[in-house]
Image (spheres, rainbow, N blue to C red):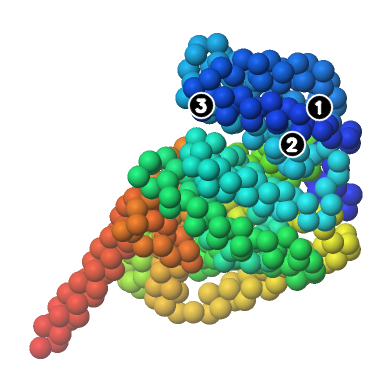
Amino acid sequence: MIVLLLLSLLHPFPAHAAKAVDVSPALKDLNQAITALQKGQSADAPYSSFKTWWQQHKTAVSKSSLDVSIQLSQDISSASLDLLNGNRKQSIKSLSTLRQTLQDYQSGLYGGVKSSTHQSLGSYITELENAKHALEQKDWVTAATQVKQLQQDWLSVEGDVVSQSQSIYTESEKNLVMMDAYLANPKTHSKAQPLIDEMITSLKPLASANYGMWDAALIPIREGLEALLVIGALLTFARKADSTPAKLWIWSGTTLAIVVCLAVGALVSFLLSVASFGNNNSLINGWSGVIASLMLLYVGYWLHRNADIQRWNAFIKSQTAQAISKRKMISFALLAFIAVLREGMETVIFLIGMAGRMPASTLILGIAIGFGFLIVIGVLMLKLGVLLPLRPFFMISSFVVFYLGFKFMGSGIHSLQMAGVLPSSVSDRLPSVNSLSIFPSWYSIVPQAICLVIFVIVLSKRWLMNVFHTNSKQAKEA
């Protein structure tokens, strides 16, 4: 599996080898059809012209890109049905979706001719400019459709962005959700344009930037540190409990996640396109983030609860020689699997996105340096964790775990909004802190607030217990 992934990085396969078809006549027909409907006129003539073009070029488009051929067939069926039913508003929306698919194909997001070094990000900026034009024309239906497509196509370029600027990556991803929310509400339509202007301004300098070894190295470092914190805390706890089975379960969950990530990377490289995997990746990030957050809350509570030396000794004495129950070991393995899967999936997709944008030897060297750095950090974490006294270890670990749970909850719900599972609603009254994955949406703020309340309750309970024990001890001594 690793060999397959390395082959895809050394010799990235273009998804489709045939020459891309010129879709300019088709786009002209669709633009005329949409304009006619917006004016209350019939769209039969331009749409009939488009269908004639499609019948003549369908085979060539299919040879150029099977993905776009399937998508266009679905879009055409939807548009034809809406026009037949006489639903003007829905017809405009479905025709706009059809037009966007053709524009994506024209800009290279569906493959065809092998992309040049920065064509992918440059094409995405063209998409942004098309959406900006629709906003300037107050064509809200088209703009909303284009923003939805921008969300789906984001995975095609996010590797280019995150390798050069983490802040621009996070801000752009947040803006995509906020634009979708603003365009869903007629009262906030005008707020979408400043966000799209900001994205265009921030992404343009990145489109002409050159990649180097450290760009490749920073991707596994950035994406892997949080997963490493989770694995390190679990392994250190297992070592302190002197439980070899627990360590094996944790390593098994970690290894399985790595294998799954490599398998998905090979699948995307050889059989699919990165764009076609976009929505699935958002779903994986979203649900894994929420599940991991809930599990981390439990683990954080459990670690904080055992920070007391007497309680820890009682726990060890109450267990078998393995010290940790099988059910808890399985939960540790599951948490390790989810944490690594969440971060590893993005790492692999980002690296695939960089393939072909620098010499293969430079890319592989950068990946090796990045993972080497993570290994060094992991070894240091385990060594220092074991050397720490019991109480400080549990206290620090519980704080780290609660922090990651809070952050995973926010980023997980944000990904579900990107995938369309949850509405992209935002509120100007809510704060936005990218570094903590705090986004201005009630859907993410409320669960994060609940996480914070649980953390405060756990801390307060521990503090009150310590005060009670101290007072009781002083009373006995007196």
Label 1, label 3: how many angstroms apart (C-alpha)?
Answer: 31 Å
- Which one is nearer the viewer's eye here, 346 or 328? 346
Would residue 364 be visible to someone looking at this image? no
Q: Identify the amino acid type marked 2.
A: Tyr
Position of residue 476 in the picture relative to residue 47 (left or right): left
* Camera-side residue of 64 and 470: 64
Q: Which mark is residue 61?
A: 1
Q: Quadrant of the C terminus?
A: bottom left
Tell me the tag on residue 414. none
Going by the image, does 93 lie left or right of 311? right
> In the image, residue 313 lies at what x, y percent?
37, 68
According to the picture, the residue beneath numbered tag 3 turns out to be: 39
Residue bearing mark 2: 105
Whether residue 100 is situated above or below residue 213 in the rendered picture = above
Quadrant location, the N terminus: top right
Residue 446: percent from left, percent from top: 32, 52
* Quarter of the image where one finds residue 267: top right
* In the depicted structure, whether residue 313 falls above or below residue 320: below
Q: Residues within 10 Å of mark 3 (few under 14, many from 20)?
A: few
| Residue 406, position as x, y percentages in the image | 41, 59
For marks 2 and 1 on the same chain, the one whose residue lies earlier in the sequence: 1
- Labelled pair 2, 3 in contact (Cβ < 8 Å): no
Q: Earlier in the sequence, mark 1 or mark 3?
A: 3
Cα gap from disc 2 to disc 3, whole angstroms: 28 Å
To which quarter of the image does residue 23 belong?
top right
At label 3, which amino acid type do we have?
Lys
Camera-near label (2 vs 3) is 3
Query: What is the three-letter code of the residue carrying label 1?
Result: Val
> Horizontal placement of 168 versus 14: left or right?
left
